[in-house]
Image: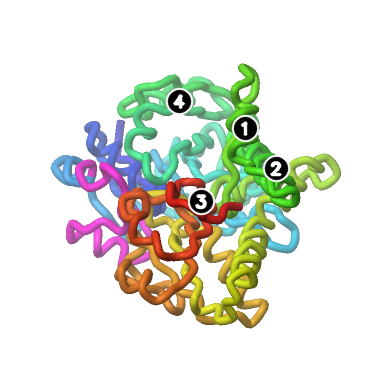
Amino acid sequence: MSLINVIGLGYIGLPTALILAKNGNKVVGTDSNSSIVNSLTQGNLSFEEKGLQKLFEEAIENEVEFSTKYKTTDTYILAVPTPYIEESKKLDPVYVISAVNSVLDVCLKGTAIIIESTISPGTIDKFVRPVIEERGLKIGEDIHLLHAPERIIPGNMVYELEYNSRTIGADNLEIAAKIKSLYATFCKSEIVLTDIRSAEMSKVIENTYRDVNIAFANELAKICRTDNIDVYEIIRIANKHPRVNILQPGPGVGGHCISVDPWFLVGDYPDLTNLILAARKINDSMPRHVLGRIRDIMREHNIKDISKVGLYGLAYKENVDDTRESPTLQLLERLDEHLAFGVKVFDPFVKNRMVDHQFMNFEDFVNEVEIVVVMVGHDHIKENIEMLKDKLVLDTKNICLLEDIYKL
């Protein structure tokens, strides 16, 4: 296999580039952000992730390179952002289109463009094929298009890159088989070959399925709250049934998968996505529900100063520094809408200052507040839970074993 140019060195592209290089492939990782490229070139990772440092060191031994420029080759993996348009809920393909255009500027005849970014069903037909055809290039001869959607989660990326099954969608099964051999250099699980639209749809519905199931748990939490019933006890009992597996409720849904991908379906199939839309609304409402619980606790204890409230956790999930679509950031937006300023924030994984009143020392954070709202179940808070024993605690993750705490 010739040089592989991985485009986009974020949460997906960087680990993908590194694991390809570790397993003997010649790789250049490209990103338009020169500071990320410079940092990686100097041997410094741009984000923290379990096992990533070791993988980085192994990839460097195999001479992985980083650049702001696209390389001339015949194999490109695109792992660029795919946001959605707030008003229409449709995918915004601007980064994908830009990356494809840049590839076409330098690539060889017979190039395979593999899009790993999560895209809505039909994106390649509607947006990518026209870009190629406008240049007078023949798809299937000059350019081969494939979709190999990523399937990893922050906090367990390196393991899941190796052991999660993968899907490769292509127009031509012979080309798909060739790319399968590339992914098989690091993927130890099943690699399924299919057509492009099926690959597009399968990734989106995986995350939509999870979103709908989380929404059921969150709605159940609201129902139980109105009658002062312990939702966690209800779920524990219900899950004794052999065909029931209710998930745990939480303060909202974050990350760039579960909280975003369902909107692609809502935007493209507005008349057919009633359940999916309802689930999205429920999960998006949870930060406001947490705000209501904070208000209840403040009233009960006659606390009138919002600055006495501390939010533990800025990341969207435990033990990572990824803050994309974070429920805590969503909650801070709700507070801002109500002109409620001064809430304290702490997250042991988020080292850069992102918001006002963000503490970098946990003890200082605890000493400054009366109410601690556990928004993320980091191992750190579990290990230091005794430091909250004299505080009012709202535990949105059901991890705190202290007495007399508040829950969703």
Residue 295 percent across, percent down from the top left: 64, 69
Residue at point 64% right, 24% down? 244
Q: Earlier in the sequence, mark 1 or mark 3?
A: 3
On the rendered structure, is 237 left or right of 154? right
Does the magenta segment cover residue 165? no
How would you rate the neighbour count of disc 4 (Cα within 10 Å): few for under 14, some for 14-19, many for 20 or more? some
**Rendered view: 319 above or below 324:** above
Q: What's the mark number on residue 49?
A: none
Gap between marks 3 and 2 measured at Cα = 44 Å
Residue 149 percent across, percent down from the top left: 51, 37
Q: Earlier in the sequence, mark 3 or mark 2?
A: 3
On the rendered structure, is 167 left or right of 300? left
**Labelled pair 1, 2 in contact (Cβ < 8 Å):** yes
For the record, the magenta segment spans: 30-55
Residue at point 57% right, 23% down? 194
Residue 135 in view, yes or no: no
Residue 335 in view, yes or no: yes
Provide the residue designation for mark 4.
165
